Amino acid sequence: MDREGVVDAIPLFAKELIAGGVAGGVAKTIVAPLERLKILFQVTRSEFHNIGLLASFRRIAKTEGILGFYRGNGASVARIVPYAALHYMAYEQYRRQISYSFPRMGNGSVVDLLAGSLSGGTAVLFTYPLDLVRTKLAYQVVDAPKLNVKGAMGSERAFGGIRDCFSRTYKEAGMRGLYRGVAPSLYGIFPYAGLKFYFYEEMKSNVPDNYRKHIMVKLACGSVAGLLGQTFTYPLDVVRRQMQVQRLHASNGPEFKGTIGTLVMIVQKEGWKQLFSGLSINYLKVVPSVAIGFTVYDVMKAYLRVPPRDKAIVEEATNKSESQT
């Protein structure tokens, strides 16, 4: 059997899972250094706030080497591959279901908004513990010249890796500990994921057909979509990070209570500007990340011979009618 025969034998949902997973893994790895710095800025590590972006790059390079920029990236990729696979696949599934069940809504941007929001929430619920572990690993900072690890609570030893961080978090607080900060994640992902897909598909629809398949067009549309979507939801991302790492602070630090309580406490203790701490880094990260993600996803769909959405909706409607008969 040739390659086309093998590809055609793969179920549609599996093709979408593969395309989404590859897109997420590639995009996340490329922007990993900026993701590491963004987390350090979000969780109020004053030594990084005071020296700025370029000096922070130099400090990590000097004290931890090139691999320091990828601290926690193993957990990040381990999370983003299943997350992106579920996110993109669920988006396509929700989109087909909405178009099939509510034909009066049409097949436009509103459907993209709803499908993107639902798929984002679905992906977060299934992969959140890996995001928590990634954040805790990235929060630890190697201190030169003794190469001690800062960020562990009290005299606790640093996490030894993904498995160690996962098991110790579970032993400490059970499943509740693994889902600490999930509420602001959901509050943020519903509008962000929906707006991201909405802006991307809306922008592509306004591009002439003969330019729509160009990679640079996809990159441009993805960049603007990620930028706009992230701007509206960034404060909730800061709240989530602070809730995730609060147990890594000293025991006499303030205890965050819920999403709204944490939001209010951050504003009271650190000022409203802290809600946008690291946003400039996030812009630098989001632009290539979302752009690369959407572009690689579309390229992978073409490689895997995924049918156009309109055709997939018709095929699903036909299959359902046949099964009901």
Image (cartoon, rainbow, N blue to C red):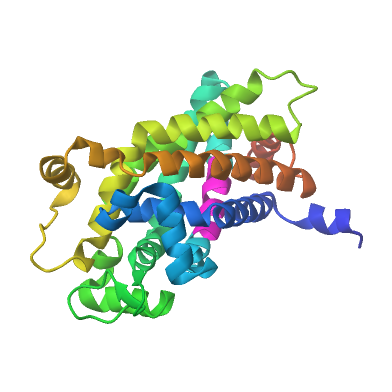
In the image, residue 210 lies at what x, y percent? 80, 22
Between 91 and 259, the one lying in front of the other is 259
Query: Which quarter of the picture shows residue 247?
Result: bottom left
Residue located farthest toward the left when viewing the structure as drawn = 252
Tell me: residue 223, above or below residue 104. below
Task: Check residue 154 for magenta coloring.
Answer: no
Query: Which quarter of the picture shows residue 29?
Result: bottom right
Q: Quarter holding the N terminus?
A: bottom right
Which secondary structure dominates the residues rendered in magenta? Answer: helix
In the image, residue 279 lies at what x, y percent? 38, 40
Task: Check residue 87 for magenta coloring.
Answer: yes
Q: Is residue 166 left or right of residue 218?
A: left
Tell me: residue 44, above or below residue 324. below
Residue pictured at 48% horizontal, 64% vertical: 61
Tell me: residue 236, above or below residue 20. above
Residue pictured at 10% horizontal, 41% vertical: 268
For residue 59, say whether it is visible. yes
In the image, residue 102 lies at what x, y percent? 51, 26
Query: Which stretch appears magenta?
Result: 80-91
Q: Quarter holding the C terminus?
A: top right
In the image, residue 223 lies at what x, y percent? 56, 34
Q: Is residue 157 left or right of residue 111?
A: left
Residue pictured at 44% horizontal, 44% vertical: 120
Residue pictured at 77% horizontal, 43% vertical: 302
